[in-house]
Amino acid sequence: MRYSYLLAAITILFSCAEKNPKKTETLEEKAKKIHENVITIDTHDDINIKNFTDSINYTQNLDTQINLPKMEAGGLDVVWLIVYTGQDSLNTEGYAKASENAISKFDAIRRLCEEYAPDRIELALTSDDVRRISASGKKVAMIGVENAYPIGEDLSKFEEYQKRGARYISLSHNGHSQFCDSNTGEKDSIWLHNGLSDLGKSAVKEMNRLGMMIDVSHPSKESMKQMIALSKAPIIASHSSARALCDHSRNLDDEQLLLLKENGGVVQTVAFSSYLNTEKHEARAAFMKEIHKKVADSLKINWYERSQFSSLTDVQQAEFIENYPKVLKIANAIAEKDNSAPPAVDVSDFVDHIDYMVNLIGIDHVGISSDFDGGGGIEGWSDASETFNVTLELVKRGYSEEDIAKLWGANLLRVLDEVQAIAVSLN
């Protein structure tokens, strides 16, 4: 009798198990949960002030790679909007013109957050702000300055920029500034300061005092080494990748990466095609060149290659910035349907750089950036709406939720906290 009861019980258990089989979580389901749980931070997104007006702005799904609808679609929580100014003559006239451009971008970012979409995005100044705003359901804006050139020789402007919301500054861009040499000096081995100028050394100290992160993505290697030697706080590379995998002067070599680790800083891996895989990028670029030209001709607009940008007039640069995303969008759609198109640099190539740098310097010193609307964007992460694909690839590679949280922003916020804490101790 006992045996028959036992048999009946086992039969019932098996029957229940068949009716309610335990579902195995797919990688995509796991990635979606992680993507929703972590705060995703992109540390470099360029802006055009024409997209910050009362009639045209980021509340709309513009052709830009970054805007609120795309951020919401892709689960991108935090964007560092960039106050970028190109390089000009190192004189009072050049500084004044650049300063006007920089202030217009600060003002544009403020308008977005305070006038056009205060219910959807808010400016953060600290890591606590980031967490509070993100928890409220809104998107987060932060401000980085790409090129200290517009500051001129007046160090008090660093504090003005800090009060306007800037939380990192690069002391140079594509050209030697009054503060330091640029990576572009590698082309001809002509250097202006052999690293930092005296003004640049004072700028490092002033940024430490103000609690602003020092960005080394564009300065030369010697400039970076001198900044690390002088700085009392950790530094960042806001948008750079691994030079060992792609030999471009904008990337960091192993010596630089190890110095950054020792300094306690973080390198924000950048989704910029030519900084990730030279061979794939060049093959694709050669194929796309003709398509870009044909699309531009069909739209009856002038077309310039990105490599020409620094030699263009102000009017031509503005024209390029406005037309670039339109042409790219159409050209990429055409290439997708062409079986003869060489493969584009993609999310896998991007995460290869993350893997390399994590293996070399550790999970605590690597982060993520796109350089959207400034030339960035790869297949699979071509704009903010595709942000989830990065998390999915990280899950496929075996990264844990804790690791992914660090890569997507916790490391960067840790550095910001340390920089700001050091500033308090210096004042």
Image (cartoon, rainbow, N blue to C red):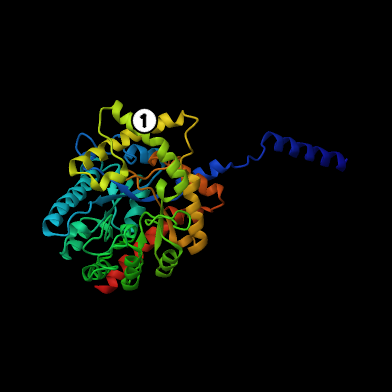
Is residue 276 among the parts visible in the rendering?
Answer: yes
The location of residue 282, given as percent across then percent down, is 43, 44
Q: Residue furthest top?
A: 298
Instruction: Let me know if residue 271 appears in the view.
Output: no
Say which residue appears at 28% left-offset and 27% top-offset. Answer: 299
- 161 left or right, relative to 231: left
Q: How many marks?
A: 1
In front: 277, or 165?
277
- How many C-alpha atoms fall within 10 Å of the one at disc 1: few (<14), some, or many (≥20)? some
Residue 358 position, x and y percent, is: 50, 59
197 or 351: nearer the viewer: 197
- Residue 123 in the figure: left or right of residue 97: right
Q: Secondary structure at mark 1?
A: helix
Q: Position of residue 334 (x, y in %)?
A: 41, 29
The quadrant of the image that shows the N terminus is top right
Which quadrant holds the C terminus?
Answer: bottom left
Q: Position of residue 52 (x, y in %)?
A: 22, 41
Residue ID for mark 1: 330
Q: Nearer the viewer, residue 397 or 290?
A: 290
| Residue type marked 1 | Ile
Residue, far left: 93
The answer to whether 402 appears left or right of 4 in the picture is: left
From this viewpoint, which residue is outermost toward the front? 188
State the residue at coordinates (49%, 47%): 349
Between 418 and 201, the one lying in front of the other is 201
Above or below, 246 relative to 361:
above
